[in-house]
Amino acid sequence: MSNIKVIEGDFVGSTGKYALLVSRWNSFVVESLKDGALDTLRRKGIKEEDITIYYAPGAFEFPLAAQKIAESKKFDAVIALGAVIRGGTPHFEYVAGECTKGLAQVSMNTGIPVTFGVLTVDSIEQAIERSGTKAGNKGCEAAETALEMVSLLGKI
Ligand SMILES: Nc1c(NC[C@H](O)[C@H](O)[C@H](O)CO)[nH]c(=O)[nH]c1=O
Ligand SMILES: CC(=O)[C@@H](O)COP(=O)(O)O
């Protein structure tokens, strides 16, 4: 029998308060990410009164909105849900890059987990595949990760 101590998050008796940060951009796929995240939270036992949904214009606005939400100290985790879809110019790189970098910074600076349910895809088809069709639902993954992180941080 090993003496190694192993600490990990789990989903036993999941609790906590969760903020969903949702973009209005690409709402045709992002609303499916939101539905997936809500379904995951509910199925793991999180009550509706412990969930708040915030809408932001686009993924570029996510870092500031997430920072304000995290600083409010009302939530144990922020679940960011959006879709950045490549167009014909370098715009995609800037929006996706700032969103990703900014959300990671918010998480590190506030100590609140910010999970990344933001699709960064080359086509609408890839977005649809990852929002509840053949490649799963990144909203569910982001919600599950938030639950696991809240559990893990509670044990450290
Ligand atoms: N093209 C996408 C955007 N673009 C909008 C930016 O996020 C931002 O709202 C605008 O530049 C004003 O500051 N946003 C997405 O979330 N997804 C996209 O594919
Ligand atoms: C991710 C984007 O900002 C993208 O939709 C912009 O498209 P385009 O590069 O064709 O202007």
Image (spheres, rainbow, N blue to C red):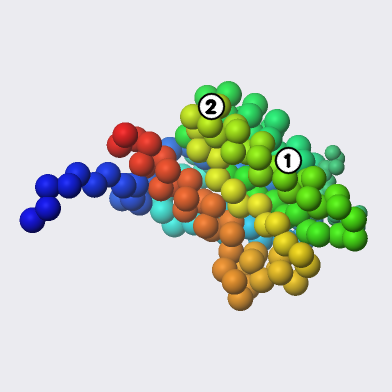
Task: Give the crowd class for mark 2: few <14, some 14-19, many >=20 residues within 10 Å.
Answer: some
Q: Which quarter of the picture shows residue 103?
A: top right
Is residue 30 at all visible to an observer of this figure? no
Ligand 2 shown in quarter: bottom right
User: Which residue corresponds to the image point at 59% horizontal and 56% vertical from the top-left?
Assistant: 139
Q: Determine if the C-beta at disc 2 is less than 8 A from ligand 1.
A: no
In percent of width and height, residue 88 lies at 90, 60
Residue underneath mark 1: 98
| Residue holding disc 2 | 110
Circle 2 sits in a helix, a strand or a loop, which is it? helix
- Number of marks in the rendered image: 2
Identify the residue at image location x=30%, y=36%.
155
Nearer-the-camera pick, 13 or 141: 141
Amino acid carrying mark 2 in the image? Thr
- Horizontal side of residue 107 vs 144, given as left or right: right
- CA gap, disc 1 and disc 2: 18 Å
Question: Disc 1 beta carbon < 8 A from ligand 1?
Answer: no
Which structural element holds mark 1?
helix
Query: Which amino acid type is shown beneath numbered disc 1?
Result: Glu
Image coordinates of residue 65 in percent, x first then y, are 69, 32
Which quadrant of the structure image shows residue 19? top right
Horizontal and vertical percent for residue 136? Answer: 57, 68
Q: Which residue is depicted at the point 64% across and 57% down?
A: 33
